[in-house]
Amino acid sequence: MTETVKLKSPIDGSIYVERPVASDQAINAAVERARSAQAEWARVPVAERAAYMLKMLEALVAMSDEIVPELAWQMGRPTRYGGEFGGVKERTQYMVEIAERALAPVPASNPKDGFRRYVKKDPLGVVMVIAPWNYPYLTAVNTIVPALISGSTVILKHAAQTLLVGERFARAFEAAGLPKYVFQNLVLNHAQTEKLLGSGKIDHVNFTGSVAGGRAIEKAAAGTFMTLGLELGGKDPAYVLPDAKLDHAVANLVEGAFFNSGQCCCGIERVYVHEKIYDQFIEGFIAETRSYVLGNPLEQATTMGPMAQARFADFIREQKAEALRKGAVAHMNTKDAQDKEGSPYLPAEVLTNVDHQMSVMREESFGPIVGIMKVRNDEEAIALMNDSPYGLTASIWTADTEHAISVGDRVETGTVFMNRCDYLDPALVWTGVKDTGKGAALSQIGYDNLTRPKSYHLREKI
């Protein structure tokens, strides 16, 4: 009997998509085709490779009427937000724009008479992308586009919760006229994925997911010497100073905490507010949070859909219950008939009187819950921001740019924001520290991480 992957929709619990898992023979054939296609693809000029990406983007955007409701059915995001096309466009277009100069050979900094010396950036070969369900297009495009422009071929293994995304990418590349086997989409189970990574046939893997998943990837790849890009967990903090523009900070931090039902890699999970403005901030934050409407993501009135899976919502329920047992105060206590154990529907919650002995302030929640603490000064805020095994982003809310920089310099994180959060700028490298993982995506540095340096030391005068 053929093994299949079933996608259970968070909307109503039905099986929305079911696909057969690739056979071992099909996997091996796909890798061989990718390797063979890569040699030809690498000879295509960078500008031509980049042009295919723009054609793919055009084809993908043309599918928006299908893709937007599909996302709601697959992972629960409300259709009113229109998919992920804004970010997909911005990232693809930027990586296309910088491609030729980012991939150009780098001359030696000290010219020598009679010699030509430079470092060329060669493609890695076959790149595997293991993409997550929370932003299934955005996270995948971060690697797919620059890897292909760099001259590598790509094999995509998308999350079971968003199976159709891989098919949409494949269709878009086909519409763009991309040469066959330069991009391939495979449906794999965990064992097959680990076996493929351990085979030595993959040159680079990019994985976005849990810390446990990242460790499994590293273990599977051990001894192959492939390069890794791992974006793992996060527990992103915010620090609100007395001179912050309060209404701006409140509005943006509420959205940063609860957009996409809190299922954001760089979403706000903990907030530290200076004691001078704490009471005002809490009042505003609670009022803003009350505007969220939990419901069916296919309805325009809904601003917060179900979480992708019921077990994710149950974990948040456990975090909240533990925090309340330890003295936390819940301010929303929204009553919703669908909010019960075993249901993915979970309203937003705001907790105060929290501390770092509680899971909600230490362990990644990845859901619509946030803890807010009062702090006396920078020293206390920085110590608490750094009291985490994670480090993806941190946001600082102040009118003083130099002060934000001085605080940011002391925070263990991959990105420092001031007066914004939960955003990825493709001109800046996307990276993390500690258990958030290693590697880097987008920007010039993203191209460097998807190529290998090759030195040319040429004596022209003998």
Image: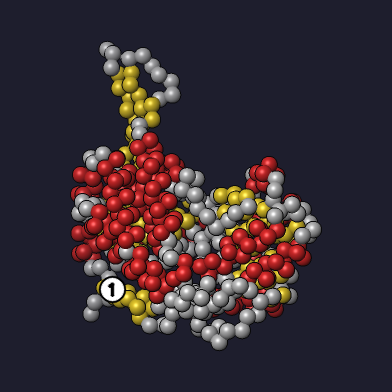
Compared with 265, 341 (above or below) is: below
Residue at screen point 60% across, 50% down: 417
Q: Would you say 270 lies left or right of 125 here? A: right
Q: Would you say 174 lies left or right of 313 here? A: left
The image shows residue 52 at horizontal and vertical percentages of 28, 49
Which is more toward the observer, 380 or 134?
134
How busy is the neighbourhood of tag 1: few (under 14 within 10 Å), some, or many (20 plus)? some
Residue at screen point 46% across, 77% down: 299
**Residue farthest to the front?**
300
Q: Name the quadrant of the C terminus.
A: top left
The image shows residue 286 at horizontal and vertical percentages of 68, 70
Which is more toward the observer, 54 or 179?
54
Identify the amino acid type marked 1: Arg
The image shows residue 422 at horizontal and vertical percentages of 55, 57
Q: Quadrant of residue 291?
A: bottom right
The image shows residue 110 at horizontal and vertical percentages of 43, 20
Which is more toward the observer, 76 or 27?
76
| Residue 205 visible somewhere in the drawing | no
Residue at screen point 50% across, 82% down: 343
Q: Name the quadrant of the N terminus.
A: bottom left
Compared with 202, 306 (above or below) is: below
**Residue farthest to the top?**
462
Residue at screen point 27% across, 71% down: 21
Compared with 455, 258 (above or below) is: below
Classify mark 1: helix, strand or loop.
strand
Q: Would you say 353 lies left or right of 36 here? A: right
Q: Disc 1 designates what residue? A: 19
